[in-house]
Image (cartoon, rainbow, N blue to C red):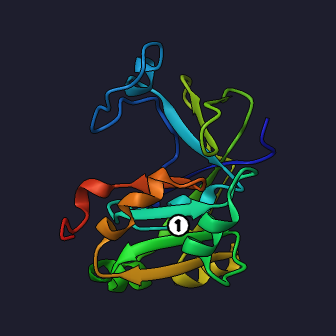
């Protein structure tokens, strides 16, 4: 069990997290279709940088795994020593700098791990323990050892999914679709 779990939101007024279905259903493997149903979602501390963004901001985050090849590390990280890379499109840069997101800490006892990029779910109503406001999100990412890279289009990273790195794409439906 992770020591700390969080939920990030642009809403500063949440007093209870009630299970709810995802806004956009995703086709899931057999047995995981329950993940489209009513749940409270949380992220563990190590993976929290994936959510230090405005909610609708499309982004791709990459990090090394135990089996990451030197070739893939060099191709994507180059000489960067950051633990994680975060890519956004140029059109979202101003919003990232101006946005405020709220990190709600949640009690761990009702959550179960999905064993997937630090994601946890609960089917019970959850009372947050603490709320912190995050502003200057590029600075917050830097403090979490994440290098932010701003590029014209996320589509140039489509080959990253074929690499030996972990690749998480979030809100990609909002991305610029140019090649």
Residue found 44% across the figure and 63% down from its top = 60
Relative vertical location of residue 11 with respect to residue 88 in this rendering, above or below: above
Relative vertical location of residue 143 with respect to residue 2 in this rendering, above or below: below
Q: Secondary structure at mark 1?
A: loop
Q: Quadrant of residue 82?
A: bottom right
Rendering coords of residue 165 (x, y %): 60, 56
Residue furthest front as drawn: 71
In front of the other: 88 or 162: 162
In front of the other: 40 or 67: 67
Rendering coords of residue 117 (x, y %): 61, 45
Residue found 60% across the figure and 53% down from its top = 164
Residue highlighted by disc 1 = 52
Q: Is residue 88 left or right of residue 126?
A: left
Relative vertical location of residue 179 with respect to residue 29 in this rendering, above or below: below
Q: Is residue 17 left or right of residue 126?
A: left
Residue found 36% across the figure and 81% down from its top = 151
**Visible in this render: residue 82?**
yes
**Quadrant containing the C terminus in the rendered view:** bottom left
Residue furthest left as drawn: 178
Q: Quadrant of residue 146?
A: bottom right
**Visible in this render: residue 11?**
no
**Is disc 1 surrounded by few (<14), some (14 to 19) or many (20+) residues within 10 Å?**
many
Residue furthest top as drawn: 31
Query: Number of numbered discs present?
Result: 1
Rendering coords of residue 78 (x, y %): 62, 80
């Amino acid at each position: 069990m992770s020591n700390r779990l969080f939920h990030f939101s642009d809403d500063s007024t949440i007093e209870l997290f009630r299970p709810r279905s995802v806004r956009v259903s995703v086709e899931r493997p057999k047995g995981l279709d329950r993940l489209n149903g009513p749940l409270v979602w949380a992220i563990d501390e190590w993976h929290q940088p994936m959510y230090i963004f405005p909610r609708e901001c499309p982004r791709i985050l990459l990090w090394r795994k135990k089996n990451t090849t030197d070739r893939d590390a060099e191709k994507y990280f180059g000489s960067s020593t950051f633990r994680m890379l975060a890519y956004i499109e140029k059109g979202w840069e101003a919003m990232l700098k101006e946005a405020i997101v709220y990190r709600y800490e949640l009690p761990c006892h009702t959550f179960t791990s999905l064993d997937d990029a630090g994601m946890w779910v609960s089917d019970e109503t959850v009372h947050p323990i603490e709320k912190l406001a995050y502003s200057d999100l590029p600075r917050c990412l830097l403090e979490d050892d994440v290098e932010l890279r701003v590029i014209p289009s996320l589509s140039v990273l489509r080959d990253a999914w074929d690499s030996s790195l972990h690749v998480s794409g979030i809100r990609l439906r909002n991305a610029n679709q140019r090649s």
